[in-house]
Amino acid sequence: MSLLEIRGLFIDYYSDRDAFRAVDDLNLTLERGEVIGLAGESGSGKTTLGLAIMGLLPDNVRSSGSILFQGEDLVAMQDSDKDRIRWRHIAMVFQNSLEVLNPVIRMVDQVSEPMIEHLGLGKEQARARCVRLFEQVGLDSVWLDAYPHQLSGGMRQRALLAMALSCDPDILILDEVTSALDAFTKKEISDLLCRLQKTADCSMILISHDITFLSAVSTRMAVLYAGRIMELGATSEIINYPMHPYTRGLINSTPGIFLYRDLWGIPGEAPSGQVRGCPFFGRCTQRVDLCSRQPPRLLPVRVPASAEGMTVGSSERDVACHLGGVVTLLRASGLNYSYRLSDGKLLDAVKDVSLDLREGEVMAVVGQTGSGKSTLAHMLAGVMGSDVGEIFFDGKKMNGDRYGSGYGGIQIVFQDPASSTSSRLSVLDAVKEPLDINGLHSPRERIELVASALSSVGLPTTDEFLRRHCGELSGGQRQRVAIARALIMRPKLLIADEITASLDVSSAANILRMLKGLQNCRGFAMIYITHDLMIALKASDRIAVMDGGRIIETGNSHYVMLYPRQEATKRLVGARIHKSSGGNCI
């Protein structure tokens, strides 16, 4: 029997005008000694769930389902029985310590109150226990006689933690205990909770929007959105390989997880009312029609064997998604390509390359000049065929007809924009050409789409600019035109082949920032070909390292850069020009 088991929990807040569902058909278990983190944006139902477990929901709330603590249903329990459970068996550390603590009562009296009421201790006994509790949470006993306003925020949180531990509860719920603290104090609280988990012999439920904090303390994580669990599994594995699009968005929004990666929030807003289908439908980039009609169930999903960050023996994750989580968009296996030289000999440019790319993922392919990066890019885009091997895109095999190059398919932006934009064409005709070739939309709609595409890449949409020939543009402008030309086809995958290699640093930075912003907003996947490891680190989710036509190493961009395994990768990382205080060429 689990220490705590939540079954089919629904919680609704009622007002004079309407009702709001805060928790929607939630199922969760907590084992003895386990630390589980509840992650999610504000309003996802985390605190409401904690209050429900404590039996502290306000009067305007109606709940159904069950919360079983050691077999007893807390939802159906009378208030008098809840008082028996509260503090003695289940305790909570609330957020906003100044609001929770009484400003005119000394700390010793507030921390002593649960012990006197629930354990029957006298004042002197309670005070003696307070001394030990303060020591346990890292507070000097001199602060026992202080008032709340005389303590810092971190000290007040420690005092509240001491109060929650005072009756030796079986379950400790901590609600955003580090949200208003400085980085040093957060680290101290995290370390303290890790120690307490080992010494206090209690299970913990950590409520936080700070995934960095949860990654340091919790062993298992439940990701909540609009009152539902979207993903459930081992914390470290979820962070290294998120399976739900919402989880991936949360991790990409967290500054402390991958220190060198740019931050990108999740576009859109959470639903404000009841939804018929999946609550994440409006913000999801891989949604299908079923998602709008039917809410997905939280079901076990098998994690790919190739996924990074998986521990030995792990194979399943619980995910609420009709597609089973983030889908694989592109899969290539056993690709080979050889160039025939003038003397008749064959030069192997790509050798037995296999890779996969998930929907909405950014992969950087890095390597020295001549390692096969651009050849691989052209093969994946269908510009060149492969001698051997297969490429599947969006579940279908790509053949010689370049399946995937149409609307919603694969587009490539070349290193030299002159390769994709004729100098003789006007900007209007160059960007519009893919629509013309594929016979898409009416002439008027095509012009409107061109204006929208140019605007999205930061270019003017005036008649004068539209009439200009591509050969009259600067390098940066022409590359933006090439990107607009690719994006007008609304690709699911964009391949960018060294697109900033010939640009000055300012133009390159602007284009990369613009492109990554569009990728985050629209959700297309991207393969970024580059020899610049720092750009790869900042812009990509994963890195594939090529050497001699082979992919020799793949992994999370953070780990590949900081902990390279292969010698060729180590050479690439070591070859970076580092900032120095002066010349080192003497």
Image (cartoon, grey):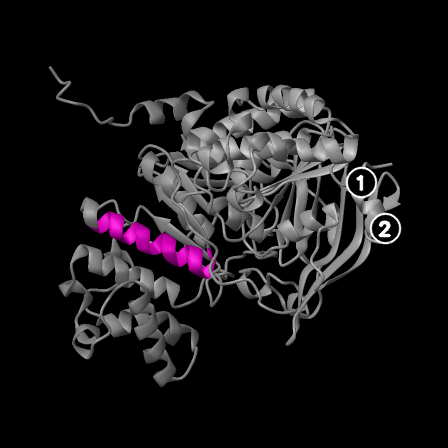
- Asked if residue 324 shows in the view, the reply is no
Q: Which mark is residue 85?
A: 1
Question: Does residue 511 show up magenta in the picture?
Answer: yes
- Quadrant of the image for the C terminus? top left
Residue 53 x/y as whole percent:
74, 47
Q: Is residue 14 above or below residue 129?
A: below
Residue 243 at x, y percent in the picture: 61, 46
Q: Position of residue 463 (x, y in %)?
A: 20, 79
Q: Main secondary structure of the magenta part?
A: helix
**Pointer 1 local density, CA inside 10 Å: few below 14, some 14–19, many at least 20:** some
The amino acid sitting under disc 1 is Ile
The residue positioned 63% from the left and 24% from the top of the image is: 130
**From what the image shows, is residue 116 above or below residue 18?**
above
User: Start and end of the magenta stretch?
Assistant: 507-524
The quarter of the picture where residue 172 lies is top right
- Viewer-proximal residue, 225 or 453? 225
Tags 2 and 1 in contact by the CB under 8 Å rule? yes
